[in-house]
Image (cartoon, grey):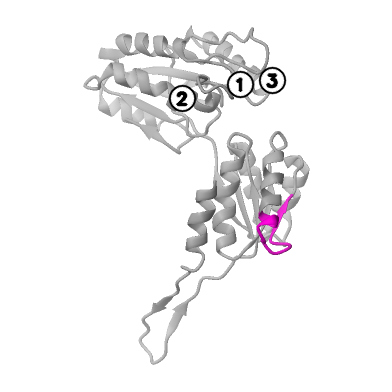
């Protein structure tokens, strides 16, 4: 996080203007100036990192900021705000306002004194933010959900792909909008890859996040864990099979990573963002079908080949 502030501190004096050629005598220039008050709405899955990614450029450009952390993770933002005050950030330049998004967040977005909104979170909330910001023509930046694909062709190193892909899905207990939660595999290597993927997933170390040996920690809440488990039942009802994972008998908010096989891309588990440690394996025949399946999603954000 310190590197983010270090980078944007170096960028703070790089706001260069442009000179635009004109036909008549005279000169036309473009200057870049602060936009004003920026409302920075931060999610709970990477709360400290994302707060700095928003704060750094906003402050470097000369704006005042209001950080609205997620209700589940307010402490990091409050501590960061105190650190910035102690470091000498002028009074009023940084405010941290914890509270529920339905009231506090909505009020910030709709307030005409807010000149810019930056939101990272789920797509439905992003839609609401655009609607609330529209009457004031407030500038809005959104980073929303994902259902990204990792594509495995039959000329790949199958063992290597099966060893590496689980972390791209299950890191942060799958609570990552860039998670490659759809694994598209060419059918000629589908069985070989799936067996290796299941074996690697079963071997992942789930446990205390303070233990250096742990690979997968707990989920953010009981509600998020239960939501992910519900999708396993949904997938089974749609004809998919839970090849590994899904047992939540351990105390706490733990969910062992799960792999669903036999998934249809158009099914709910193939289309909806689960935001938990669940990978959906989907077969394809050729490159054209792989491209079609990868693009057959309302989401974007990331991908792997």
Residue position for label 3: 222
Is residue 42 within the magenta segment?
A: no
**Residue bounds of the magenta highlight:** 84-96
Q: Is residue 89 magenta?
A: yes
> Which part of the image, by quadrant, shows the C terminus?
top left
Residue at label 1?
218
Q: Is residue 72 positioned above or below 91 on the image?
A: above
The residue lying furthest to the bottom in this view is 25
Label of residue 284 in the image: none
- x and y percent of residue 235 in the render? 52, 13
The residues bearing labels 1 and 2 have C-alpha atoms spaced at a distance of: 15 Å
Using a 10 Å C-alpha cutoff, classify the residue at mark 2 as few (fewer than 14 neighbours), some (14 to 19) or many (20 or more).
many
Residue named by callout 2: 169
Q: Provide residue 299's location: percent of width, then percent of height.
A: 48, 35
> What residue is rendered at 50% in x and 74% in y?
31
Give above or below for 285 relative to 179: above
């Amino acid at each position: 996080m310190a590197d983010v502030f270090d980078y944007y501190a170096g960028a703070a004096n790089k706001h260069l203007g442009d000179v635009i050629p004109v036909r008549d005598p005279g000169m036309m220039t473009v200057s870049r100036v602060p936009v004003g008050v920026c409302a920075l709405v931060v999610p709970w899955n990477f709360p400290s990192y994302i707060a700095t990614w928003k704060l750094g450029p906003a402050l470097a450009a000369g704006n005042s900021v209001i950080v609205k952390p997620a209700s589940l993770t307010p402490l990091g933002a409050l501590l960061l705000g105190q650190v910035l005050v102690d470091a000498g950030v002028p009074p009023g330049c940084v405010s941290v306002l914890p509270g529920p998004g339905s009231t506090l967040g909505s009020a910030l977005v709709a307030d005409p004194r807010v000149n810019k909104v930056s939101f990272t979170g789920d797509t439905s909330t992003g839609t609401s933010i655009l609607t609330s910001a529209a009457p004031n023509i407030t500038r809005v930046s959104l980073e929303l959900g994902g259902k990204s694909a990792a594509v495995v062709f039959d000329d790949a190193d199958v063992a290597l792909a099966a060893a590496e892909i689980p972390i791209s899905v299950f890191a942060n207990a799958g609570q990552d909008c860039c998670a490659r939660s759809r694994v598209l595999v060419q059918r000629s290597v589908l069985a070989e890859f799936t067996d290796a993927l299941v074996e690697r997933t079963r071997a992942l170390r789930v446990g205390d996040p303070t233990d250096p040996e742990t690979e997968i920690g707990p989920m953010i809440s009981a509600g998020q864990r239960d939501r992910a488990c519900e999708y396993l039942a949904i997938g089974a009802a749609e004809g998919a099979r839970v090849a590994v994972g899904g047992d939540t008998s351990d105390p706490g908010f733990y969910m062992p990573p799960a792999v669903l096989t036999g998934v249809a891309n158009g099914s709910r588990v193939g289309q909806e963002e689960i935001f938990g440690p669940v990978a959906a394996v989907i077969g394809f025949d050729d490159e054209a079908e792989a491209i079609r399946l990868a693009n057959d999603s309302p989401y974007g954000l990331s991908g792997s080949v």
